[in-house]
Image (spheres, rainbow, N blue to C red):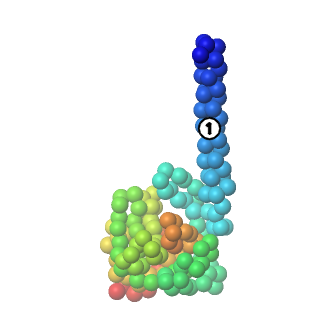
Amino acid sequence: MTIESNADSKRFLNRLGASTAAVVLVMYLAKIWFVDSQDPNPHPSPIIREGVSTQASQPELEPGKAAVISWRDAAKHYGEYAMVEGTIVATHNSGKACFLNFHPNYKRYFTAVIFASAFSRFPRNPENYYYGKTVRVSGSIKEYKGKPEIILNDPSQIEILNDG
């Protein structure tokens, strides 16, 4: 093997590496721009999840503008602005987010989420305050990791129906 063919091989490998990196970058950006940004929610909301931030606050519901549905049916209403009713049976506050769960199996069933950026607007220790209460939460139902959720940005989005 000559020095010249060795240099050609190095140039080829450098170009191949740069091309591969460019393809990966384009695929990643396409995912962000075209897949992740296809939000059926016409009402933008501040969501910070895993370091990705989107836009600001959800509007208040006007009476008669949203359907009241059971938490059991939330998965049938992705992308819809609705009022979801049920009892908070399990909670968890990670310090970054407070999860208000309507079923003990939080990985599969509807959850209302309050992110740390909104904690100051809600009662202190929301995981304890809402636990055991029958509530109605309003907002856009989104799918996250295969299950339905509503992000709560303001206490007006959660109405206590029964103190349990």
Image location (x, y in percent) of residue 104: 36, 77
**As drawn, is 19 to the left or to the right of 53?**
right
* Number of other residues with Cα within 10 Å of mark 1, as a class: few under 14, some 14 to 19, many 20 or more: few
| Residue found 63% across the figure and 32% down from its top | 16
Residue extending furthest front? 1
Q: Is residue 104 above or below residue 98?
A: below
Per the image, the residue denoted by label 1 is 20
Image location (x, y in percent) of residue 75: 55, 77
Quarter of the image that includes the N terminus:
top right
Q: Is residue 38 above or below residue 157?
A: above
| Residue found 56% across the figure and 73% down from its top | 141
**As drawn, is 90 to the left or to the right of 153?**
left
Residue 129's image quarter? bottom left
Image location (x, y in percent) of residue 97: 41, 61
Name the element at disc 1: helix
Q: Is residue 99 above or below residue 36?
A: below
| Residue found 40% across the figure and 57% down from its top | 96
Q: Nearer the viewer, residue 72 or 8?
A: 8
Residue 65's image quarter? bottom right
Q: Amino acid at mark 1?
A: Thr
Residue extending furthest top? 3
